[in-house]
């Protein structure tokens, strides 16, 4: 039982990858993969190629609480005990568990003069489970504790999952004597599967005197392509969707950098503007507007018909909680993110970075902020570190290493090394690994970086 | 500068690993812990009106509503008896014989005789009823008349029998019987006549009763044998299975009923002999429905209430004992008679109910034609009946107090409650009746030792509604009662083998004699909920 609880909680604790904040990657502007956070970024190499290993980013983020806030050492010995009340106190009204996978399967980049072209094929998977704090209160405290006489506010309880292939053609170009770089990536998207709760309102109110339980709410849930995952060959889905576009979408990344002086430059980008229209293998559920109060067994009804009572009661509940099903096409927006960065050159080999991150998940704004530094040793090694805040987690330490050994480039980075070292004390866990081939010397002007 | 940067990066990495590199969570040190959710759920609810409360156990119990005022009365009914009219008139079957002499046959001695001789004769037949019943006329629904002839005449005799008092198909019944000589004497023959549907007149032209007349015409046809002159013809008449559809006459002075019965007052069934209950206007009604066409008198006696548990009886006095019932003037009709005993025509009807008896008992006898024969004939049909029903009506107006019930029921928890910290049952009673109810539960082991009680003492669980000066409810009573079974009580639950339930009740300010009235708009709203604090260890 303990192990099950720990595993379940562990899943909740993990955080990170999520809608790819990639604070650390943002500091490595000279990497080819940096176009994923700003299409105006360009690598030092004139040509870059990746087949299969280019970038694999994985992250989990849980905004609610850490394992340490739930499993606490007792004061009088070193044993651990569960303290759900502490965990609940650490939560916000709405909490997220986010998973994000980015697999750049194919990537090419080529710089010709002032223009840099890129072409990537990326497998994207994003999952968000949004739960209200009262869900935990309801589970751990029951409805007879602090929720008695209150509405357990489960509004917003929902899921959002996007799985799709992204084919991006990018280009950026420098202007104003290379002080300004403007870039864009145009994306053709092939939706694989989607779930999202477009509308989720749920409340459970327990009357403090009668204990009558009133359930109110409405749920609009949409899904597409889930039967793909019921097939045994789901591992091949990515390849299947390389060529098929059963659910087509479009996306756009825009970015710019501006070098104000030798010491200071700024960057801004908007990533994943766009949508996917889901029209294949859809199953949508629209529930009734529910407002039902359970007052217990109606004795009069029971006495009148004790044999048919259960059936009648079940029929009543079915009627109240009925949901209509359809396969209508629908459209979902991408998780759009905004980056605003500033970089200050302390020395040729040392830059300090500041980054303001913004994203929207199911219509909810989630900001992040990062401060960091990057050290670059010639063209061989660059190391970065940062401190970031995101999702009510204020102690994220990011680290990154990028090595270029001849034509081969390796990188490994995380937005929160604490998530690796102190699993139970973290709300974010993130790793970003990759290897690619880079050819061509960097421009002299950029050498200073 | 480069060196400084490298050092800075190295220091940063070192500090990070120093701070977090050794942080490990030892999950083996998780202490056994408990999950303590608190669940509050409604269990049941209901609204009970006067019908649910006062008439739910016995379909004979009726709640009667005054359509004008809405006032409620309890009526306990009982079908006392049904008297079948057929019992009053028992028919004796006809069985009568007579001899027709030679002279009635117009015979005189002679030698060999080959001619014919005709003669006539007339006889009467008695048809008797039981218990002095005088039959005047009757319509049969079944029956046969058996005619047997025998003679020692060595000749063939043809006999035509005519019954003027038996009309079949609009004509007097006539039957011809041939007594054919076949060489030996005596010789005989039998004929059977169906008299179903016959109208029988036993008055012989309004001259008598219980009598039928038969006319015979005989024709002798000579066979060549001699006639001695002393021969005769024997006639035997009998009846089989004669039954009537209706009958008229005088059916005598018969004692037709002699019964004792009682009415169960369900309202007192469980609290017999305890407390005080004063109804302001009770009444006992006897309702008769009579389709027997004759005077019947009933006599009531020994009316009393009985407390069975103590054997106490309380005699009702001053009541009218003799009652003549209405009866129909036309066959097929019925007449009703209502006999009412109330506080106006008895000395102490309220008083004998006040001690909360279980039964109202009485004796009843009935007689027919108490004043002898009357100008009009008695009549009845085979479906005529006298039904007698009783109704004890208790208008719910008065006051009561001191009622108590106590019962012990077996109990076996059969559940593991080790993971429950406490259970609270909450009873919410929103009462529109001017009646208060207190209760106590005692949880006992197999030796009936009390392990614990639900409350410190009998506790009010239903608060009485308030009444105005007219006894009408003007404010509902509302009461929340929490029964908490905390951990030590739950620990004892497996030992509980019996639960003793004790309750008491009274009307609003009953001991003070405050009159309350019950109306059909009163109701009781009940709500039962439960709160459980669990302690699920893992």
Image (cartoon, coloured by chain):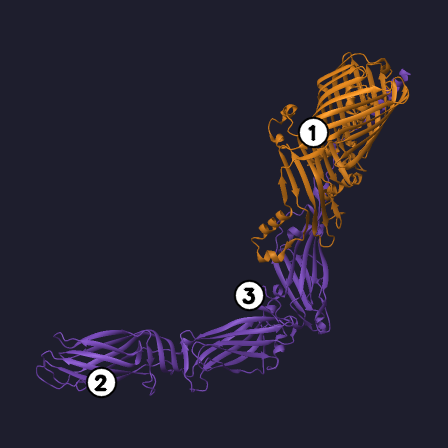
Q: Name the residue beneath numbered marker 2.
A: B121
- Residue sitting at x 29%, y 78%: B171
Q: Chain of mark 3?
A: B
Whole-angstrom CA distance, mark 3 to mark 1, is 73 Å
Q: Chain of mark 1?
A: A
Q: Secondary structure at mark 1?
A: strand
Q: Name the residue beneath numbered marker 3.
A: B59
Q: Position of residue A439 (x, y in %)?
A: 77, 12
State the orange chain. A
Circles 3 and 1 on the same chain: no
Left or right, B1 with respect to B462, comes to: right
Residue B316's place in the image compared with B508, above or below, is below
Residue A143's place in the image compared with A65, above or below, is below
Q: Which of pointers 2 and 3 lies earlier in the amino acid sequence?
A: 3
- Residue sitting at x 62%, y 62%: B407
Q: Secondary structure at mark 3?
A: loop
Q: Identify the image quadrant of the C terminus of chain B.
A: top right
Q: Secondary structure at mark 2?
A: strand
Q: Name the residue beneath numbered marker 1.
A: A249
């Amino acid at each position: 039982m303990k192990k099950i609880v720990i595993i379940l909680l562990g899943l909740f604790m993990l955080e990170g990858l999520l809608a790819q904040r990639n604070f650390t990657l943002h500091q490595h502007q000279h990497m080819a993969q940096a176009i994923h956070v700003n299409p105006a970024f360009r690598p030092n190499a004139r040509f870059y190629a990746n087949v299969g290993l280019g970038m694999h980013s994985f992250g989990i983020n849980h905004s609610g609480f850490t394992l340490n806030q739930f499993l606490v050492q007792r004061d009088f010995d070193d044993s651990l005990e569960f303290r759900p009340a502490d965990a609940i106190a650490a939560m916000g009204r709405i909490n997220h568990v986010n998973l994000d996978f980015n697999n750049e399967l194919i990537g090419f980049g080529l710089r010709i003069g002032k223009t840099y072209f890129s072409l990537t094929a990326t497998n994207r998977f994003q999952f968000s489970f949004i739960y209200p704090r009262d869900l935990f209160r309801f589970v751990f405290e029951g409805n007879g504790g602090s929720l008695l006489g209150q509405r357990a506010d489960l509004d917003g309880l929902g899921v959002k999952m996007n799985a799709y292939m992204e084919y991006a053609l990018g280009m950026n170009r420098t202007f104003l004597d290379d002080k300004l770089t403007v870039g864009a990536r145009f994306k053709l998207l092939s939706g694989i599967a989607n779930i999202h709760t477009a509308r989720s309102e749920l409340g459970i109110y327990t009357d403090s005197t009668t204990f009558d339980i009133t359930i109110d709410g409405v749920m609009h849930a949409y899904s597409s392509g889930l039967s793909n995952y019921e097939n045994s060959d789901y591992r091949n889905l990515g390849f299947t969707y390389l060529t098929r576009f059963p659910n087509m979408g479009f996306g756009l990344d825009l970015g710019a950098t501006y070098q104000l002086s030798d010491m200071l430059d700024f960057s801004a980008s908007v990533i994943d503007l766009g949508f996917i229209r889901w029209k294949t293998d859809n199953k949508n559920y629209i529930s009734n507007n529910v407002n039902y109060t359970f007052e217990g067994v109606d004795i009069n009804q029971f006495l009148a018909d004790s044999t048919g009572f259960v059936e009648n009661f079940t029929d009543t509940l079915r009627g109240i909680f009925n949901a209509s099903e359809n396969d209508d096409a629908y459209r979902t927006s991408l998780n759009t993110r905004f980056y605003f960065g500033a970089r200050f050159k302390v020395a040729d080999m040392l830059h300090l970075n500041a980054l303001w991150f913004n994203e929207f998940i199911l219509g909810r704004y989630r900001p992040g902020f990062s401060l960091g530094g990057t050290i670059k040793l010639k063209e061989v090694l660059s190391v970065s570190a940062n401190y970031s805040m995101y999702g009510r987690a204020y102690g994220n330490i990011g680290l990154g290493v990028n090595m270029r050994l001849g034509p081969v480039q390796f990188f490994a980075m995380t937005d929160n090394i604490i998530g690796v070292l102190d699993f139970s004390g973290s709300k974010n866990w993130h790793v970003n690994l990759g290897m690619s081939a880079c050819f061509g010397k960097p421009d002299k002007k950029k050498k200073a970086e | 500068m480069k060196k400084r940067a490298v050092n800075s990066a190295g220091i940063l990495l070192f500090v990070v690993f120093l701070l977090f590199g050794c942080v490990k969570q030892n999950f083996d040190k998780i202490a056994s812990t408990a999950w303590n959710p608190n669940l509050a759920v409604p269990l049941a609810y209901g609204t009970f009106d006067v019908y649910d409360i006062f008439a739910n156990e016995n379909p004979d119990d009726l709640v009667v509503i005054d359509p004008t005022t809405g006032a409620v009365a309890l009526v306990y009914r009982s079908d006392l008896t049904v008297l079948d009219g057929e019992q009053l008139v028992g028919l004796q079957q006809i069985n009568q014989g007579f001899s027709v002499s030679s002279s009635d046959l117009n015979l005189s001695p002679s030698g060999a005789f080959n001619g014919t001789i005709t003669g006539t004769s007339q006889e009467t037949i008695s048809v008797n009823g039981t218990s002095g019943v005088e039959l005047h006329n009757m319509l049969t629904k079944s029956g046969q008349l058996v005619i047997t002839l025998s003679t020692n005449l060595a000749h063939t005799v043809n006999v035509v029998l005519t019954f003027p008092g038996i009309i079949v198909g609009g004509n007097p019944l006539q039957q011809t019987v041939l007594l054919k000589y076949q060489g030996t004497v005596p010789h005989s023959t039998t004929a059977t006549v169906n008299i179903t549907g016959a109208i029988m007149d036993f008055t012989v032209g309004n001259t008598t009763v219980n009598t039928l007349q038969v006319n015979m015409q005989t024709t002798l046809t000579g066979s060549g044998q001699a006639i001695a002159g002393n021969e005769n013809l024997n006639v035997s008449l009998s009846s089989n299975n004669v039954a009537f559809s209706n009958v008229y006459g005088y059916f005598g002075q018969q004692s037709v009923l002699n019964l004792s019965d009682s009415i169960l007052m369900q309202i007192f069934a469980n609290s017999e002999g305890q407390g005080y209950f004063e109804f302001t206007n009770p009444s006992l009604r006897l309702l008769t429905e009579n389709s027997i066409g004759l005077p019947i008198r009933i006599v009531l006696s020994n009316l009393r209430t009985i407390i069975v548990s103590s054997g106490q009886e309380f005699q009702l006095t001053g009541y009218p004992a003799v009652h003549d019932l209405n009866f129909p003037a036309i066959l097929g009709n019925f007449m009703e008679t209502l006999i009412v005993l109330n506080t106006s025509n008895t000395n102490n009807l309220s008083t004998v109910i006040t001690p909360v008896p279980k039964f109202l008992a009485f004796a009843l006898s009935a007689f027919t034609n108490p004043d002898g024969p009357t100008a009009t004939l008695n009549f009845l049909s085979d479906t005529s009946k006298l039904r007698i029903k009783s109704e004890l009506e208790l208008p719910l107006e008065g006051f009561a107090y001191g009622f108590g019930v106590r019962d012990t029921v077996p109990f076996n928890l059969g559940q593991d409650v080790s993971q429950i910290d406490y259970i609270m049952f909450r009873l919410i009673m929103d009462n529109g009746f001017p009646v208060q109810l207190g209760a106590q539960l005692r949880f006992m082991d197999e030796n009936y030792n009390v392990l614990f009680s639900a409350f410190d003492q009998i506790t009010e669980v239903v608060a009485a509604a308030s009444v105005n000066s007219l006894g009408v409810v003007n404010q509902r009573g509302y009461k929340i009662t929490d029964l908490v079974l905390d951990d030590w009580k739950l620990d004892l639950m497996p030992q509980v083998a019996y639960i003793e339930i004790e309750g008491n009740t009274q009307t609003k300010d009953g001991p003070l004699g405050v009159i309350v009235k019950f109306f059909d708009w009163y109701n009781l709203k009940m709500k039962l909920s439960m709160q459980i604090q669990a302690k699920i260890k893992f």
